Image (cartoon, rainbow, N blue to C red):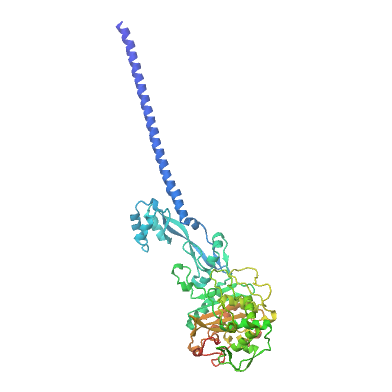
Amino acid sequence: MKHLIKRPLIALSKHLTLWNQAIEERSILEMTQQRVFVAGGIFCLAFILIAARLVDVMLIRTGKDARQSDDISQHLVLSRSDIVDRNGEILATHLMTASVYANPKVIINPREAAIKLSELFPEISFDVLLTKLTSDKGFIWLTRHIPPKLQQAVNQLGIPGVYLQKDQHRVYPYGSLVSHVLGYCGLDNSGLAGVERYFDKRLRNNAEPLKLSIDVRVQHIIHDELLKGIAEFKAEGGNAMVMDIKTGEMVAMVSLPDFNPNLPNQNMVKDTFNRNTLGVYESGSTFKIFNTAIALETGVANINSRYDATVPISFGRHKISDFRGKNRVLSLEEAFFYSSNIAMTKMALEFGTANQRQYLKLFGLLRAPTIEVPEISAPLTPSTWRDITTVTISYGYGIAVSPLQVIMGIGGIINNGYIPQATLLHGNPKRYQNTTPIVSAKTSRLMRHLMRLTALKGTGKAANVPGYDVMGKTGTSHKNEKGVYSKKARVTSFVGAFPQDNPQYIMVVMLDDPKPIATTYGYATGGWNVAPISGKMIARIAPLLGVEINENSLEYNTDALEPTSNYLMPASHVSAHEDVD
């Protein structure tokens, strides 16, 4: 009986034990699962928090700060087109570089980072770097366009929040040679001057190179001869342009002093001044081209006209005279190549103020010219146009215009009355400013004849190059310094074109305050400085430009003017308002 009772109790005890074990195992499993879920939830929450922080720092805040800094990084992605000359020579291009920027929001120890970076970039002070690295911005430049060795050094520092960004640096292979035409770019590759600024949008958004009308070979010759001329005559500066009369394309444009566009932050302000387009000057005798053309076109003068230059003209308190004049009656041709102020005055008084203003407007001398650079000046014109104004303008005083205006206006006179629209772009169709000629073909032919005589017999003789039928006119004007005409400081100029029968190219060359030297026997007028400089230029560029030699004109004597020429005056005898070339 006892045996029968004990067996069931033992079996029940085993079952109870097994049941308890099952319950314990289930509890442990459930607890483990709960712990796994809790741990997983913690990890998920941590990941979400980290991800949210990264999004906040790297996208939301950085994006906001980058937009506040004009989205600098976006500008770096855009390429800037090359600029080339008419023959495809690269004048401006870009190099891939790297720049250093920081996100101060993720920099752990700004002071330590500033110390390390100041050692690497000694040109940036520790205080400047610390200020940048403690900024509340999400994007800030530390330095731009660093060389490869420094790029590697920045990477080796391994500072969290300091990064390298691919960047582009604008470079100009020819340095200062074409500086006033090209202009330059800032650190962010935006155009700040010249065609870089004028075509900034096009250069940013067009992969095709911008082809200019400049011929870098001609540019080099003009630059070289002008630089040597400035040194020889101890001038303060100078400028020159060569333009295709038929298309208006500028083949060369030089202004000295110039600057290195590769170093825009180091350029002197005065050196970035483009004398060809920004400078305005009283032209002196080159303005007699306009005066004579008006006289011919209005009918008050013709090839048979005569002008009594025996005695000076009294005009109120003013006396108009020819220094070392012929003191006799002059033909139209003589009046022009002897550069007679008396004859020009008489012409102007005959055609009158109204005609003078009308034609100067037609010649484009009373408004600002246009060309593809932003550096353009308007002329300085008389506020009150009286008779004395008409007289002084006839020989180049009382109105100040830019060399660009002069070359376009005279270009129109010798181009059968059609003014070429100056351009710095190559391949544009023929463009003229006017559809109706400003002067007749007859007047144009006669003006070419008079300018050719000046290069053969007059003050432009030193600019004549055998075989190219050079024509031109020199000019010398006294500089107006604070309302007073200087007796010593002057601006000399030569406007020339070639060949005579069918002009292809026109040029203007100017010197700012050239000095008399031993080889000019004390003279400092246009015939003694800019004329020979221009002749050297023409002799070198005409073959490059493909101008054919006229065998019939090789016989002319092209020796320089002798010092006894009675239409040149010593520098020591210059007086205000007397044109002396």
Where residue 292 sits: x, y (%)? 63, 83
Q: Nearer the viewer, residue 175 or 340?
A: 340
User: Can residue 192 be seen?
Assistant: yes
Where residue 358 sits: x, y (%)? 64, 77
Identity of the residue drawn at 47% across and 82% down: 234
User: Can residue 548 be seen?
Assistant: no
Where residue 139 sits: x, y (%)? 43, 54
Residue farthest to the left, as pictured:
2
Identity of the residue drawn at 29% across and 7% down: 2
State the image quarter where residue 308 is shown. Answer: bottom right
> In which quadrant will I find the N terminus?
top left
Q: Is residue 413 above or below residue 370?
A: below
Where residue 157 sits: x, y (%)? 37, 55
Q: Is residue 372 above or below residue 409?
A: above
Identity of the residue drawn at 48% across and 89% down: 518
Q: Nearer the viewer, residue 197 or 212?
A: 197
Q: Is residue 7 left or right of residue 366?
A: left
